[in-house]
């Protein structure tokens, strides 16, 4: 196809992968760069026993229209089973959905379709700087640092950033961004999340989810196996999850110390609990988990060819205390439309090639 535009997507989380798949289908030359060694971002999984399980607790609801539509497109909707969930202190039950092979199947289907369309996903690439080339092409130059500290520069007509707004402000200091775009990016604050995944010999609680107050280091426990059954994890899965500001002393403690604090609180609830009841554990820290302020204006980048699709833009100026994939996927769909519309017959990113509508 002549004049196929190239796009560099920063982040292989759900947003980056959903956008990359759609744009690869529409004829873009797609490169995705991800700082971690695996895809998924907050929806990353790990293998426990003979199953994949999310590092952070994930389930879907019947009204998650966008998630369900995506699963259907990928041929995965029939893999979802719906279970009754019992919430501590609440009458009634909520139906929650969970895929047969965990959300790992969603992330791996997205990654597979991207590469099947000729897209490339680079892992272990941390984007440190986005600039524009000096030559007549005026392409974006995305500088990535690899784990051995070497730098690789990827050129592209379009850049889509899917990480935190603050990070975008940091890595674009060489671009000519007006302050009324840059300042709101820096003003957005986020809570961090720490989630401890425990594989236990027996279930800790009879319910699925239970909230906790300020005298506990976590805000919620989720007994995942009470929802989906024991499967082949080789134990009962319990998540302890808490969101807080990074000024909280626990954020800088070692994983072992956080585990000790969480375990001590579990013992308060169940004094007969001993260390050997826990077969294995894994702590996951997510720095930019939950935006605590949202931008007052739409965060549309003023530079042609530079796009942002970020958690903080979800929610119509209402800060949500909930983590949801559904609005993230809706925003990814809107972003793809915006990218297609804006490049149609326009010069990118400054005075370079004119790209025709590509379908
Ligand atoms: C504790 C927790 C529980 C949740 N539970 C649920 C649930 O039950 N149901 C539900 O629907 N949703 C849930 N969610 C929400 C869901 O996980 C998110 O909506 C979704 O994963 C967001 O995807 P994203 O791609 O926008 O962001 P992310 O997953 O954060 O992806 C961004 C990616 O960009 C990469 N990146 C950032 N900066 C750079 C850089 N400079 N260079 C290279 N790579 C970079 C990051 O490494 C990351 O992989 C939960 C979230 C949390 C934190």
Image (tube, rainbow, N blue to C red):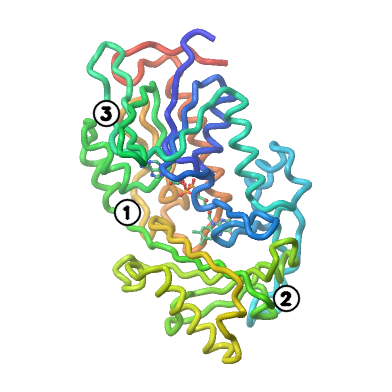
Q: Nearer the viewer, mark 3 or mark 1?
A: 3
Q: Quadrant of residue 71?
A: top right
Q: In terms of sequence position, does the residue under pointer 3 or pointer 2 come before the other?
A: 2
Packing grade of label 1 (10 A; few <14, some 14-19, many >=20) is: some
Quadrant housing the N terminus: top right
- Disc ID at residue 92: 2
Residue 67 as seen in the image, left or right of residue 250: right
- Tell me if label 1 and label 2 are in contact, CB under 8 Å: no
Give the vertical position of 301 relative to 86 (above or below): above
Instruction: Give the label on residue 188, or none.
Output: 1
Relative side of 155 to 186, left or right: right
The residue drawn where x is 47% and y is 81% is: 213
How packed mark 3 is, by other alpha carbons closer than 10 Å (few <14, some 14-19, many 20 or more), is some
Compute the Cα span from label 1 to label 2. 37 Å
Q: Quadrant of residue 261?
A: bottom left
Asked if marks 3 and 2 touch (Cβ < 8 Å), the reply is: no
Residue at the far top: name it: 2
Most foreground residue, 57 or 3? 57
- Disc on res. 131: 3
Residue 313 is situated, as x and y percent measured from the top left of the image, at 42, 47
- Residue 305: x and y in percent read 37, 26
- Residue 66 drawn at (x, y percent): 63, 45
């Amino acid at each position: 196809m002549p004049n196929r535009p190239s796009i560099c997507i920063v982040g292989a989380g759900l947003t980056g992968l959903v956008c990359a798949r759609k744009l690869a289908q529409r004829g873009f030359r797609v490169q995705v760069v991800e700082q971690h060694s695996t895809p998924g971002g907050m929806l990353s999984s790990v293998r426990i026993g003979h199953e994949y399980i999310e590092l952070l607790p994930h389930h879907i609801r019947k009204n998650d229209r966008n998630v369900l539509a995506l699963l259907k497109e990928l041929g995965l909707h029939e893999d979802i089973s719906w279970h009754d969930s019992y919430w501590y202190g609440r009458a009634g039950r909520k139906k929650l959905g969970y895929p047969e092979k965990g959300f790992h199947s969603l992330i791996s289907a997205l990654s597979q379709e991207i590469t099947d369309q000729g897209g490339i996903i680079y892992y272990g690439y941390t984007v440190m700087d986005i600039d524009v080339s000096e030559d007549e092409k005026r392409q974006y130059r995305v500088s990535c640092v690899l784990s051995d500290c070497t730098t690789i520069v990827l050129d592209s007509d379009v850049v889509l950033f899917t990480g935190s707004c603050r990070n975008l402000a940091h890595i674009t200091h060489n671009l000519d961004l007006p302050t009324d775009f840059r300042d709101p990016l820096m003003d957005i604050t986020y809570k961090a999340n720490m989630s401890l995944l425990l594989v236990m010999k027996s279930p800790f609680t009879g319910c699925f989810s239970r909230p906790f107050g300020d005298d506990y280091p976590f805000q919620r426990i989720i007994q995942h196996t009470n929802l989906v059954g024991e499967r082949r994890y080789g134990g009962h899965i319990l998540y302890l999850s808490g969101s807080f500001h990074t000024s909280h002393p626990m954020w800088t403690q070692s994983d072992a110390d956080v585990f000790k604090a969480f375990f001590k609180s579990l013992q308060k609830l169940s004094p007969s609990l001993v260390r050997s009841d826990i077969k294995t554990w894994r702590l996951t820290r997510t720095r930019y988990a939950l935006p605590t302020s949202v931008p007052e204006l739409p965060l549309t980048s003023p530079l042609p060819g530079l796009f942002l699709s970020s958690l903080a833009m979800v929610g119509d100026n209402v800060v949500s205390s909930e983590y949801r994939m559904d609005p993230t996927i809706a925003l990814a769909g809107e972003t793809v439309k915006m990218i297609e519309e804006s490049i149609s017959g326009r010069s990118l990113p400054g005075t370079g090639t004119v790209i025709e509508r590509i379908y």
